[in-house]
Image: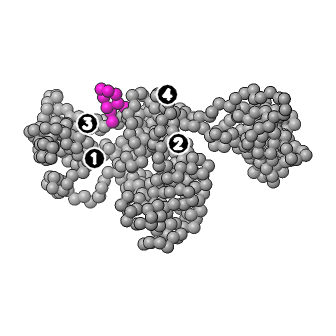
Amino acid sequence: MGLISIPGAGDITPAAQKQVVPSAYVDFTTATWAQQYLPDLMEKEAEVFGQRTISGFLSQVGAEESMAADQVIWSEQGRLHLSYKGCDIDTGNTNADNVITIVSDVDGNTIGANHGIRVGDMLLVSCASGTATATAHVTGVTGANVTAVPYDVAGTLLAAIGGTAQLNDVSVLVIGSEFDKGTVGRTSANEPAFATFNNKPIIMKDFYQVSGSDTSQIGWVEISGEEGQNGYLWYLKAAGDTRARFSDYVEMSLLEAKKKGSANQTGAADGTEGLFQSLETRGNVSNAFLGTAAQNLLDFDLTLAQLDTQGAIEENMMFLDRGTSLKIDDMLASMNSYGAGGTSFGVFNNSEDMALNLGFSGFRRGSYDFYKSDFRYLNDAATRGLINKNNAAEAIRGVFIPAGVTSVYDQALGKNLKRPFLHVRYRASEMESRQMKTWTTGSVGATTSSLDAMEMHFLTERCLVVQGANNFVLLKG
């Protein structure tokens, strides 16, 4: 009989007779069928809401990969250069005017005595309220306190940066080192900095039941393929809706889910870190693109400046709600008189047809290329659109997602791997795949129990991995 491949539904096996078996179940909500194969039942229902499902976002921007463990752990590289901010000068230490107290790194992580500055280092030092940037030489290090003497100023380091006692506004950058003739070399080494993250899969389930008496709702499609496949595929309209809703739940969970907190969460499940929590914790959160076209252009350039301080990934995808998407269109139209409405499709050789055929509007700003698409989940009144409208201050309006892959160290495999910035991990082994399971039980068709009904079960176990969250932008408010 052979397999037949249905776009969106995978490989299924037609049954020789009209039998209710899982291998011959076809889901019309996800499969792409020619119109002549659709049964009458589908044509009787008015599609007043258009396409009701929202799944597809993760399939566009991510990939799926199996895992066998209860959690996934990965490490991300730290910054190459040593730089610190929020530091202090003249805080009551001995010779305080030459002593810098290290507080945090450039990303705001508390460092203190765990900094990497060593005796002999050459520093650039400045403060927010100062009048100059000093170049200084490190003569001593005691815990979080670094003693540094300015090169070209006859006085203290505090005087060299043109300020009085400074708290929490001193920035320090290591630019090199200098040693006298005949001296010993370094006595301590700096280990490469990295951050380790983890996430765990969650088990999601759904269920549909129809009594044995009501199985007349089942519809049949007879298949005859070019490679000799023939037989019957079956479907249930209500079961198809359940499957479609479950597919959406899978996607919404990976977007919105949160990990269980460390306190006062009695009775809560463990949870998993979804996309939005990942970006609020480790990414860039912005309230940009709420003003006029000119203000939005300024916001956009500030966003680019922030991306410059991170990985500076050149190609990015923008998934936006309708209001923010129109704001971006108005911003572009104010800058370029080309084409209908003034919108430029520069990434596609200014061909509007090319841009629309790809499903995105593309443009370039600075050294960055952006591809813009609507995010249905944020618009629909029965999904995030409802929550966004109810609480505008906390509304999620869109995400910027870097394209391509990043290099990370996989703890399980013990080596560096190239992986998409955003991908899904699902539980699987040689005996069992929990990527997306569907099975039937009951007394209808192939009898498995004495229950006078057919039960359809849906299950998946998966989590989302967000690598390099510092290159993402979450639009809120």
Residue kind at label 3, given as amino acid type: Thr
The picture places residue 67, in percent across and down from the top left corner, at: 40, 31
In front of the other: label 3 or label 4? 4
Residue shown at 87% from the left, 43% from the top: 156
- Majority secondary structure in the magenta region: loop
Residue shown at 55% from the left, 53% from the top: 286
Residue kind at label 2, given as amino acid type: Gly
Tag 4's secondary structure? loop
434 in magenta: yes
User: Which is nearer the N-term, disc 1 or disc 4?
Assistant: 1
Q: Is residue 367 above or below residue 110?
A: below
In the rendered image, which residue does mark 1 sit on?
Answer: 8
For the residue carrying disc 1, how many other residues have a C-alpha within 10 Å: few (<14), some (14-19), or many (20+)? few
Tag 1's secondary structure? loop
In the rendered image, which residue does mark 4 sit on?
Answer: 414
The picture places residue 135, in percent across and down from the top left corner, at: 80, 45
In front of the other: label 1 or label 4? 4
Q: Residue furthest left?
A: 17
Discs 1, 2 touching: Cβ within 8 Å: no
Residue 149, picture quadrant: top right
Residue kind at label 4, given as amino acid type: Gly
Residue shown at 72% from the left, 32% from the top: 113
Q: Residue furthest front?
A: 182
For the residue carrying disc 2, how many other residues have a C-alpha within 10 Å: few (<14), some (14-19), or many (20+)? many
Q: Going by the image, does 132 lie left or right of 387?
A: right
Discs 3, 4 touching: Cβ within 8 Å: no
The picture places residue 287, in percent across and down from the top left corner, at: 55, 55
**Mark carried by residue 468:** 2
Residues rendered magenta in the picture: 427-435
User: Which is nearer the N-term, disc 1 or disc 3?
Assistant: 1
User: Which is nearer the N-term, disc 4 or disc 2?
Assistant: 4
In the rendered image, which residue does mark 3 sit on?
Answer: 438
